[in-house]
Amino acid sequence: MIPPHVSARQHLLTLSAAALLLGVPIVVGIGYLVGGAIGVSGDADGVSLGRVLRDGAVWRSALLSLWIAGAGTSLALTGALSIALLLGGASKIERFARTVVALPLPVPNVAAAVAVLLLLSQSGWLSRVAAQLHLIATPGEFPALVLDPWAIGVIATVVWKELPFLALVAVSLQSLRGRALTDAARTLGASPSQALRTITLPLLLRGMAPSVIAVFVFVLGSLELPLVLAPSSPLALPLLIQERRQSLDATSHGEAYLIALLATGLAVFAALVHEALRRDEA
Amino acid sequence: MTPRLSMRALSVVALTLFASAPLAMLVVTSIARGWFYPSVVPSSVDGGAWAELFRDASHRTALLNSVVLAVSTALVGTALALPLGRAAALSTRGVRRSVALLAFTAVALPPVALGAGLQLSVLTLGLGGTVVGVFLAHLVPALGYLTLVFLGVFTRWDLRLEEAAATLGAGGLERWRHLMLPLLRRPITEALALGFLVSWAQVALTLLVGGGAVRTLPLDVLAMLQAGQDQRAAAGALALAIPALFVLGVSRVAAGNTPAVVA
Amino acid sequence: MFADVRRVFVFGAVCAAALVGGCSRAAPAAAAPDLAKLPWDSIVRRARGTTVIWRMWRGDPSVNAFVDRWVAPRVLAEYGVTLQAVSGQGSELVDQLTVETQSGAKVGTASLLWINGETFGALRSRQLLAGPWSGVLPAGALVDSASPIISRDFEQDPGGFESPYGTVQMALIHDSARTPQPPRTVDELTHWIRTHPGRFTYDQSFTGITFLKGVMYAQNGGVGTFAGGYDSTTYIAARTRLFAWLDSLKPYLWRKGTQYPADVAAMHRLFANREIDFSLSYNQNEAVTKALQGVLPATSRALVLRDGTLANAHFLGIPANAPNAAGAMIVANFLLSPAAQLEKQRPTVWADGTVLDLARLPAEWRERFDSIVNDPRLVSADTLRRYARPEVSPRYHERLTDDWRRMIR
């Protein structure tokens, strides 16, 4: 509650400012999207929700984006948990490993995408090494990891970028509570695998849930990763929105706003889940 | 060496390779001219791409825009988010959760969708294609992230210290200067770094709200890549990555090198 | 409630803007068609001390360098006009101007646009272009107005709403070391693709669609069949043949035709790294300029198909909401000057074709132009001229783009 030395008026003022600063851009932004979709603001003809929902291209794009975000986040989560469990200690080598793995954390998406393109494409560095070793004769024999239907290149970039963040969360959770509780379980007679299965993992997963959702929506909305690395068919959702927006056809224009609105709905849903899972201490 | 230890050493080596290979790839490509398949090692090395990055006036403008945007987003975002997070944390559970929900929504909205909406509002304000307009757009997700940071900090905050200081007669300003700010040093440093990075990496919002007229380094890197200029794109990507690594490193050192729990 | 909240937000943002300083734009200056009635001297006078924002394709460092380091300092020195090139092309321009207009702001950002074909058509039909104005440019007298490629833009009459400044021709790029005997016709190319599985593709952007258009014209008796405005029946019949051809080739394309490179740059990257054996370019000289940049192998050469390859001109337009139409005209006029046209055409600079009629130039300028077109690595001017075909109604391009995305991709 508000402590006595903070004036109630000042407190209320700050709170209203918070609501305004955070809420207004969101409301205005979504408002314009709605306007664009129904053709109030913008040149777009009103488009029917039905037509967009019946458009197979929209669904394929949504599925691809969900696949990228889902697979990328799951792999990054698995890596992060392994690091917390295997390299979460205080020894020199473990601390070194954790510092090294944190390296990609601040690297902007664009930079990461460029690096992965140069490394993983069919004529990238790995393919060249394979050619030198006579494992392949032409670039086409190297597996398609970039501009590929399974978006492996994008997923690899997501893992590279997001594993450090999730590892950071996992390690700190583990050192805060996890280890003590695991030790307690062991003292009470649980086998190592029992303790891992029933105490450590559930605890970590529960604590990491909000961060995992944050990573998931961040990847889902990213424009630059699929722009550089993802397949041309289907297009990732942000790319589909851009393509429809820039079409010379006014109907497509309205569709773009409507698809953007659907993507927004997905994000708001994620925010609700995030809020429900977030530990609200105090 | 026990098998367990060597396994661990091996996994550390693998992790090191995994984390650093893409960066190493950028370093080599940025100084390799005409480096084509199937050569594994570049045949000729030159610093042309790096020289171009700093010599070319439009790249310099982009770099300047990026720095100005990132620094102002970090400063303004932190200055706003700190009191907002605090006020929300001191409120009822319902208010606290609503603010957290709003803040996370600002973070979660796909930039392509948010940008399309903000583009029109920023144009209505007469700020389309200006750095100020792009700054306002960058502020939206940054404020979301940073509010979540300070909400977390102040939810765990011990009010008794402030109250004691107030009882001893310290005014509001004195309390902030001598008590709060020193105690908040770590979260503030982290918030500044986070605010910087959110803006520094931004592509979609800059593209839509800036309408191509506001160049930033990430947009330049994308443009170079879409021009087939891999060498320059690699140099640009490093020019993006190095300051980001530096900012994070400095913030970690300044914050006392302890891991933080964000979000 | 909502309106109040919005007003507060607007107020706050405006305050912030005022704090950061001077962001509100001046009232619109004189419109282009009004200016065009004035004597040129008066336009020059009005333009002095102003800034022109030019929205253009910024995808090639050579083009950027020409604009930023050669044109900009000269228009500043000669006319006191500060030229600032920013990014934006094709449908992005239409999107940007549409949104600017919708927002209710009277004045936009850019004063000059790089446009042609369907972009010109789309801007014109949405009344987003200013004009007529190009008739007032003194350097316009030197333009090769007899050339069908320059006097018409995808069969549209520029009508003074745009001014030409360069010409290009569609070409395939091959590596003379890797493919010394390249196919020279659509039929030979078809055979080549079938005998070299996985080594050919086209991109999904403007250039790739233009390549497909070229094939479509070749399959249907040449571009003449499509001349004289868009005809739906002609198009559907031609599209059916083209898509049947694509279907038959699909298994032999790169990635078996399931994926397509995003743009020409992606094509160049695949080609330079031997993933495919042909790249595309809507500038026949790019094989040489890109080799000089180290983006393509030194042995890269351009190739024009004997069935005819499309050629077009690019133009400059002034948006209806341009903040500085006078300055834009100064830049458009400067770009038509023999000095600028010559510099632009050098293979080491941009290798962009001139729009001037060399016969109208003084002898010394003619010689300078002649001396640069004779680079042995370039496709000869005679060959280019012989196989050049003009573009037809942009509607064909739009339809083909949409249908390709829906039915082939």
Image: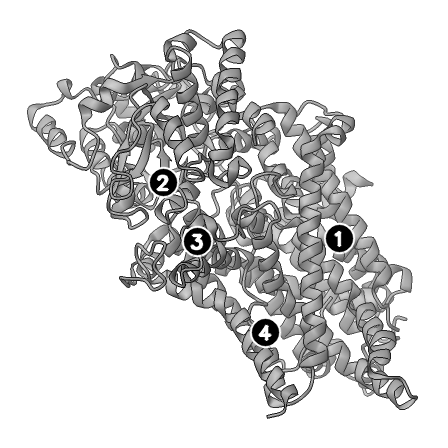
* Residue visible at 84% across and 71% down in the picture: A202
Residue C407 seen from this side: yes
Check disc 1 and give the amino acid type: Thr
What distance separates the C-alpha of mark 4 from that of mark 1? Answer: 29 Å
* Element at label 2: loop
C-alpha separation, residue under disc 2 versus residue under disc 3: 36 Å
- Residues marked 2 and 4, same chain: no
- Which residue carries the number 2 mark? C277
- Would you say residue C143 is visible in this rendering? no
Q: Nearer the viewer, residue B6 or C312?
A: B6
Left or right for C385, reference B107: left
Which chain's residue wears label 4?
A
Q: Which residue is rendered at x = 57% and y = 23% of the image?
A: C403
The residue that disc 1 covers is B105
Residue drawn where x is 76% and y is 31% of the image: A53
Label 2 crowd (10 A; few <14 / some 14-19 / many >=20)? many
